[in-house]
Amino acid sequence: MTATGGQLSARSYHWDHAHIRHGITPHYLDFEHYPLPAKSYLPAEIIPLETHDNQTGDTPASFAHLLSHAYGVTRVRRGQIPFYYRTVPSAGGLYPCHLYLSITAAADNAETGVYYYEPVRSGLVQLRQEKTGQNNPLQQLFAGERELADVRLLFIVTAAFYNSAWKYRARAYRYMLLDTGHLVRNITLNPLIRAFACNTAFDFDDGKVSDLLNLNSAAEVPLACVSVNWDKSVPDIVAQTVNHTRPCFPPVDDRSTEAAYLQDYPELRAIHSAGIPAAGQVPVPETAVTDDRPETVFSVVSESTRSLDEVPGPDLAGCMIRRRSRRNFITSPVTAGAYLQLFACLSPGRNLRDLVRDTGLRVGLVCRKLEGIDDGFYLFDRQVAVLHLMHRGNLAPMLASVCLDQAWIGQAAMNFLFFSDLAALDTARGPRGYREMMVAAGMLAQQIYLGAESLAMGCCGIGAMYDREAADLLGLSSHVALVYAVSAGPVKRR
């Protein structure tokens, strides 16, 4: 199934690689070529960044604070293959995403350029040097008339095919996009930059961004950008961090050029290449997630709750550092105050509201043992302010069954579900819309993770499901797919 003109569509990619019960082909996981936790630009010098407190997240208001909270290592599990836990979740713990920065300092003749954030060693590597007197290189990256005169910091999030495909094969693009969303939301919620104009951007020229970063586009691709317009009256903490560095064009560590890391992934390249044109997109019209009418409606807005945009910076930073994927759920009831606060954390807020609306992403809930709310399957309205009851009863065990029989899903008090009408998405935004929609789902999921952490609840995402069975269980309309699920609720504490 392809879009008009033979171009691969989001709908065809998603359904062609759907899981079917008893139809998943086992494959060997080659632990001798386990994906690298980060790129290594040896022998280039690394600019060390200060570390954070593992419990509170406290550091001075600095560039190091921003990077360590966005994508830093929070702890290490030692073993034959060390595992580096990060501030964001990742499907299978494979961390395909890489974080780059293009910096344009305010001061004349200040050294600026392009950097790679190395989370394992907690530092920056300069890849390219520019001078502020030259033409702004960022101006060439975006389509249309985007105003970039005041953009002094651009985050670029890429993902490597190999890391996710090592385990997930042709479905890997889903997880690359969701992981990108987790990381992007950690950046945009960071207390250091959320006071400034901060925008998530997808209308960039993929080829020019790849050239800027010197990427091998057969192995690693750009997926999202975050631009930050600093107030020029604010001290240039970015320039203070990097203005002592020397320009370099460092080689990639030899291990990353081994044949195993340069495998060809035609299905992944095809769906990504189909989404490279970024022009001619319009908002996805509102369509029905299911063909059923809601039984009852509940307002979930409370004056006593606050969105993540309203959480004090130190509190939110601490949640970023402490966050872990916890799924040892227990069947304790959840008070109205607790679940309403978590619903408030799900509110898209600034920097995300337009993206959720334009991509047509919808959110649902399968819940059990919530005070004052019947067990059942609900849909949120597009403002995440009202719940519509679609099916009454405890569906959590059946949801666990369609999510590859992962029993812990059935124990969770709340299972947040993300839906997309893939046909409407293809028509309105083309394959590029799939990239945007899945990143948006990952961004909202990260909000649930942080909200759950603030409430001392567990939280864990689920990207693997028997796709058609999930649609049948929830009574979804013909072109609507469940694209992501996130379980949350009380967990057993050690």
Image: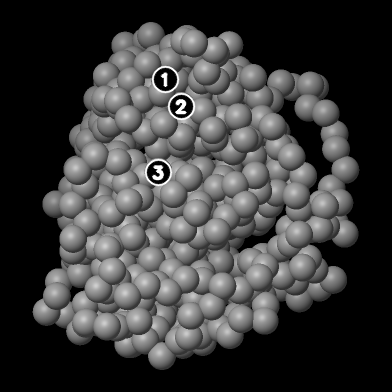
Task: Confirm whether residue 16 shows in the render.
Answer: yes
Left/right of residue 31 with respect to residue 276 in the rendered view: right
Q: Residues within 10 Å of mark 1 (few under 14, many from 20)?
A: many
Distance, label 1 to label 2, CA atoms, is 6 Å
Amino acid at pointer 3: Asp
Q: Secondary structure at mark 3?
A: loop
Image marks 1 and 3: residues in contact by CB distance under 8 Å: no
Q: Residue at x 65, y 23 (%)?
A: 18
Left/right of residue 154 with respect to residue 71 in the rendered view: left
Image marks 1 and 2: residues in contact by CB distance under 8 Å: yes
Q: Residues within 10 Å of mark 2 (few under 14, many from 20)?
A: many
Reading the image, the residue beneath label 2 is 431
Which mark, residue 459?
A: none
Distance, label 2 to label 3, CA atoms, is 15 Å
Q: Is residue 458 above or below residue 28?
A: below
In-front residue for pair 439/470 = 439
Quadrant of residue 430 in the image?
top left
**Total numbered labels:** 3
Quadrant of residue 304 in the image?
bottom left
In-front residue for pair 116/112 = 112
Q: Secondary structure at mark 2?
A: helix
Reading the image, the residue beneath label 1 is 426
Which mark, residue 205?
A: 3
Q: Could you say where residue 337 lies in the image, as x and y percent from the top left?
A: 29, 52
Q: Could you say where residue 487 lies in the image, as x and y percent from the top left?
A: 51, 44
Rendered-image quadrant of the C terminus = bottom right
Mark 1 or mark 2, earlier in chain:
1
